[in-house]
Image: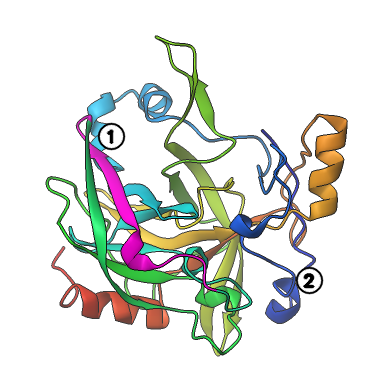
Amino acid sequence: MLAALSLLASAGSEAHAFSALRPEDDAKTQSQFQKTAVIDEDGRMTEEEYARKKGIPLTEVQNRFAATGVLKCAKHSASGQLTGSDNTITTVAHIFVGMGCNAKNTPRNCSFTAKFRDREQTSEISELVGMGFKCPIRPKRQNDWAVLKLKSPMRGITPYTLPYPDEDVKDRDDVISVAASGRDFDRADPRTGKKVFTKSIEECQGRQPYYEDGFEVLFLSNCDSSPGSSGGSILRARKRYDVLMGITANNNETDTQIAQAAKRGTPNHGPYVEGKWATYQVPLSGEFLQLLETAIGGRPPL
């Protein structure tokens, strides 16, 4: 499913660029077109499709991206990932608290599920270590992050590595976007023919970064996103491991655009256009990175 995204932005002003953005879970419509952004062409692949494209074993792909899983709460679900350790995950804050400081889900009523070698592992959340939203102070988009502890470690799954404090995503940097699920990303089960919502992997690019006081606080990308992909992984590939550079936070398709797509019965679609057609990510940096390092007991050796 392809749909439009309007950031209502000018590249020179972060405050203006993100003043109208809202969490995808808060979309008012229940249309099948709600809050879906495919930038350029849909580049998302299943694990099987990615393995075929790269000419590598499926198990290699599954093991590499096993750290990305589903965070399921009472009212909503999102993507998340093991980061730095086997019992610590990162995700978006807006699954717990809305932009109006309204409570949405209690962390301890949530669970995280990841899959390794065709075996699912699920652990309840034991603790919210911290998040960027500091209510009653009005939340800012660049603070849409959370760090949580699991009651039980995920055995055999390799967590994503932390970036260096001065490492960021610049315009045209290659990244890999991984989401545990997406409302518009599905395949037919070969045995039953039923629709299955599955993990997506996409090779895409970082685009316009936004800075405050010399530090990157948000960056745009042409990576695709939809409900369920919030909190997902934006990775930088190394030879031996993958670095979590940021998390997918949102896109902004207006209610009007959604209604128009539903009325037509066809999705909106268009190429990446700076400030008008993009998705955006929160970088793993600053307070987010510092809190994560504290949660895992310091930066792990590479």
In the picture, the quarter occupied by the C terminus is bottom left
Mark 1: amino acid: Gln
Pointer 2: what residue?
10
Pointer 1: what residue?
62
Residue lying at the far top of the rendered structure: 191
Residue 65 lies, in percent from the top left, at: 31, 43
Element under label 1? helix
Residue 99 lies, in percent from the top left, at: 61, 74
Q: Nearer the viewer, residue 89 or 46?
A: 89
Instruction: In the rendered view, tell whether residue 110 sits above or below residue 226.
Output: below
Question: Mark 2, residues whose alpha carbon is within 10 Å: few (<14), some, or many (≥20)?
Answer: some
Locate residue 121: give its quadrant: top left
Locate residue 55: give its quadrant: top left
Mark 2: amino acid: Ser
Instruction: In the rendered view, tell whether residue 33 sits above or below residue 5.
Output: above
Q: Nearer the viewer, residue 292 or 69?
A: 69
Q: Residue at x 77, y 57 (%)?
A: 6
Q: Nearer the viewer, residue 204 or 99?
A: 99
Q: Is residue 207 left or right of residue 7?
A: left
| Cα separation between marks 2 and 1 | 39 Å
Q: Residue at x 74, y 62 (%)?
A: 7
Q: Which residues are magenta?
A: 103-118
Asked if the stretch drawn in magenta spans residue 253, the answer is: no
